[in-house]
Image (cartoon, rainbow, N blue to C red):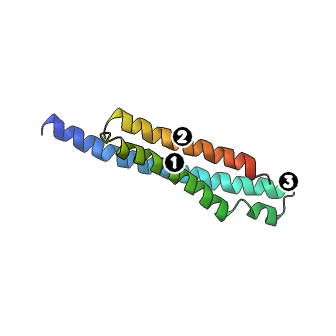
Amino acid sequence: MNSGTFQFWFFGMLVPVVGMLVCGAALIVWIVMSQRTKRQAIAAGLDGAAYRGLGPRWMGLRIGVFCIGLGLAFSLIAAFDVKEDSALAWGLILLGTGAALLANHLLVRRYAAQ
């Protein structure tokens, strides 16, 4: 086995496995924090109707903002004909994801209280 094959196999397996682990951990944290927030809202006297405003439609908007940011990053990679494994491509993906998360944070701060 030469070193080129090992590097391809190692990184070809490492990225999906680590990605799945991170997504799984994020899902577990999201579920726990969602339930904790719901209990705190009920304990603070917030009625169920007000809490439903943060429900599935709001989550759909948040996921949509995230997907738009990631899609814009991939569009820039394709438009500028950047190699998929270059540092610029990774930087654009991380920049698009970070911008989407920042936009998500600003939306939550502005509209969730209303």
Left/right placement of residue 101 relative to residue 81 reads right
Secondary structure at numbered mark 3: loop
Q: Earlier in the sequence, mark 3 or mark 1?
A: 3
Q: Residues within 10 Å of mark 3 (few under 14, many from 20)?
A: few
**Quadrant where the image shows the C terminus:** bottom right
In percent of the image, x 37 and y 48: which residue is there?
17
Secondary structure at numbered mark 2: helix
Q: Residues within 10 Å of mark 1 (few under 14, many from 20)?
A: many
- Nearer to us of marks 2 and 1 is 1
Q: Which residue is mark 2?
A: 98
Q: Earlier in the sequence, mark 3 or mark 2?
A: 3
Distance between the Cα atoms at labels 3 and 2? 32 Å
In percent of the image, x 64 and y 53: which residue is there?
32
- Nearer to us of marks 3 and 1 is 1
Q: Which residue is mark 3?
A: 44
* Amino acid at dot 1: Gly
* Extreme-left residue of the structure: 1
Q: Residues within 10 Å of mark 2 (few under 14, many from 20)?
A: some
* Amino acid at dot 2: Gly
* Residue 12: percent from left, percent from top: 28, 45
Marks 3,1: beta carbons within 8 A = no
* Extreme-right residue of the structure: 45
Q: Nearer the viewer, residue 98 or 10?
A: 98
Marks 2,1: beta carbons within 8 A = yes
**Quadrant where the image shows the N terminus:** top left
* Residue 15: percent from left, percent from top: 35, 44
Q: Nearer the viewer, residue 61 or 4?
A: 61
Q: Is residue 82 above or below residue 114?
A: above
Dot label at residue 69: 1
Q: Earlier in the sequence, mark 2 or mark 1?
A: 1
* Residue 25: percent from left, percent from top: 52, 49
In percent of the image, x 57 and y 52: which residue is there?
65
